Image: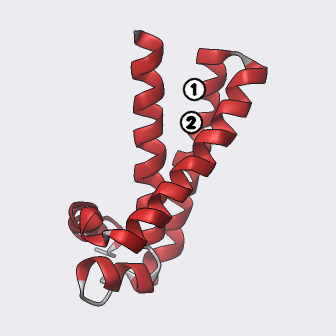
Amino acid sequence: MFNALSLLAIAALLFTSFALLALTQERHWETVSGSKAPFVQYKWAQRAIFLIAIFCVLPLNVALEGAGFGSLLWLLMVCASAGAVALTLTVCPAVLRPLARIMAKASCIFEPE
């Protein structure tokens, strides 16, 4: 049971990371939120954070499933999550609107003081 729940949590983390990574692109941001992106000058920092989150899942999978199957499962989950985000952006982008709101509020982290 623990294994199934942890894999579900990893899949949710990957989906969220890919969704936030997609929202750093102005086209997807405007599709989801209907406004201009408020964080244009900081998008490279945000993209780096989301990519690091995607790659941090690999050691979790390796710890849970072993080196061989864990890395293969990570690759499969990355592909499935990226496809799920692309499908979500195509079919129903409004599902990602709460993530866009959170991202807009969190963009103040990158603002200079």
Tell me which amino acid carries mark 2.
Val
| Residue 33 position within the rendered picture, expressed as x and y whole percent measured from the top left | 24, 79
- Extreme residue in the top direction: 1
Helix, strand or loop at label 1? It is helix
Give above or below for 82 relative to 62: below
Q: Residue furthest front?
A: 91
For image coordinates 42% across by 73% down, the residue present is: 90
Number of numbered discs on residues: 2
User: Badge 2, how many Cα within 10 Å: few under 14, some, many 20+?
Assistant: some
Q: Which residue occupies 29% across, 76% down? A: 32
* Viewer-side residue, 6 vs 89: 89
Q: Quadrant of the N terminus?
A: top left
- Which residue is found at the position 42% from the left and 30% from the top? 8
Query: Looking at the picture, does residue 24 appear above or below residue 79?
Result: below
Q: Residues within 10 Å of mark 1 (few under 14, many from 20)?
A: some
State the residue at coordinates (28%, 74%): 113
77 or 51, which lies in front? 77
**Which residue extends farthest bottom?**
36
The answer to whether 66 appears left or right of 45 in the picture is right
Label of residue 60 in the image = 1
What percent of the width, then of the height, locates residue 110? Answer: 36, 69
Q: Which of these two is toward me, 47 or 112?
A: 47
Residue 92's place in the image compared with 54, above or below, is below
Q: Are marks 2 and 1 in contact (CB under 8 Å)?
A: yes
Write down the residue under mark 2. Answer: 57
Question: Percent position (x, y) of residue 25?
Answer: 47, 79
Horizontal side, residue 39 vs residue 10: left or right: left
Toward the right, the furthest residue is 68
The vertical placement of 81 against 44, above or below, is above
Q: Amino acid at mark 1?
A: Leu
